[in-house]
């Protein structure tokens, strides 16, 4: 008797398990719309999704239905999805503007990027080491060019990083000739910078503010530039020559300005926005003059 009850119990458990399995596998097809209802829904989605350019998430909130339901209706009504037209698609920002023409300010920023800058698929970053005062100048320059307020953060080792995110800006820089890996791809200076002396001066300032150095030598002062892209080094040397300077030959990954006339003229014609370089230059010049040397 007890054995029969146990068998009945197991049969009931198996029966309900199979019923539950069948119920969970049932797929519910959407109900058939009348012509009038279908036309109303098409007009509704066309207005919200196409004309007002709202996202699927925004449409779902406005209509009080799930996002998957909105997507299914788009397919059912043969309204093609338009993700690429939606705001912030692939991190595209609507609060950024790209320069409409080349300028000295843009040339200087390109120099900064080629020096201490870095671009990823979604960000434009300038890592300035301990040059925190210069970081605020770079931040202001970014804002003047792109109408955006970049972020300034400090890494654990104290490096100052200025950056903003925009896939649109990154693609714009890539089309200009910049690359993700400057050393591996041996980046060079964009050709448009060579079109005007003012562009050349500004680009050189950005390059020397980031990858340049000012230091005292035995009989005066020297300005050096170091970069691991040889095409860029050659272009910098040619740009200096085009402005009337006499740079050294490229030695390793460096080139130098050593002549006193060149150094004095560099400060006057090109100058520094990096206050560290400017202060060192002025201090060394004062020291040299006190020692009776002419600079």
Image (tube, rainbow, N blue to C red):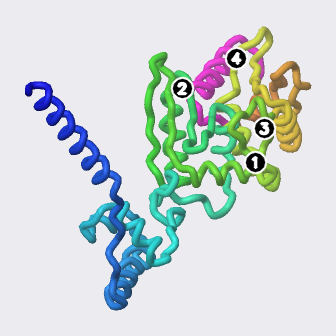
Badge 1 is on which residue? Answer: 177
Q: Which residues are magenta?
A: 269-295
Disc 1 + disc 2, Cβ < 8 Å: no
Main secondary structure found in the magenta portion: helix
**x and y, in percent, of residue 22 in the image:** 31, 52
Residue beneath the point at 38% across and 77% down: 45
Residue beneath the point at 64% across and 52% down: 171
Q: Tell me if residue 176 is in the magenta stretch.
A: no
Up-down: is 206 above or below 200? Answer: above
The disc, 4 or 2, on the residue closer to the chain's N-terminal end is 2
Q: CA distance from mark 2 to mark 3?
A: 24 Å
Q: CA distance from mark 4 to mark 2?
A: 17 Å
Q: Secondary structure at mark 1?
A: loop
Badge 3 is on which residue? Answer: 187
Disc 3 + disc 1, Cβ < 8 Å: yes
**Camera-side mark, 2 or 3:** 3
């Amino acid at each position: 008797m007890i054995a029969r009850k146990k068998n009945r119990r197991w049969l009931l458990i198996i029966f309900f398990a199979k019923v539950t399995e069948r119920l969970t596998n049932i797929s519910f097809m959407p109900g058939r719309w009348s012509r009038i209802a279908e036309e109303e829904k098409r007009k509704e989605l066309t207005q919200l999704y196409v004309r007002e350019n709202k996202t699927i998430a925004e449409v779902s909130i406005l209509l009080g239905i799930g996002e998957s339901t909105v997507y299914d209706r788009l397919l059912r009504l043969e309204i093609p999805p338009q993700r690429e037209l939606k705001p912030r698609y692939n991190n595209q920002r609507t609060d950024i503007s790209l320069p409409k023409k080349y300028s000295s300010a843009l040339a200087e920023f390109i120099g900064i990027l080629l020096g201490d800058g870095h671009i990823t698929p979604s960000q434009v970053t300038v890592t300035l080491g301990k040059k925190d005062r210069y970081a605020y100048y770079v931040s202001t320059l970014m804002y003047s060019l792109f109408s955006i307020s970049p972020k300034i953060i400090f890494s654990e080792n104290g490096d100052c990083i200025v950056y903003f995110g925009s896939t649109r800006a990154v693609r714009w820089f890539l089309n200009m000739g910049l690359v993700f890996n400057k050393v591996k791809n041996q980046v060079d200076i964009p050709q448009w910078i060579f079109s005007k002396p003012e562009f050349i001066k500004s680009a050189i300032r950005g390059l020397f503010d980031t990858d340049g150095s000012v230091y005292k030598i035995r009989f005066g002062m020297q300005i050096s530039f170091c970069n691991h892209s040889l095409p860029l080094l050659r272009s910098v040397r040619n740009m200096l020559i085009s402005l009337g300077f006499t740079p050294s030959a490229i030695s390793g990954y460096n080139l130098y300005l050593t002549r006193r006339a060149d150094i004095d003229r560099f400060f006057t014609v090109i100058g520094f926005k990096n206050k560290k370089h400017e202060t060192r230059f002025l201090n060394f010049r004062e020291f040299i003059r006190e020692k009776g040397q002419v600079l």
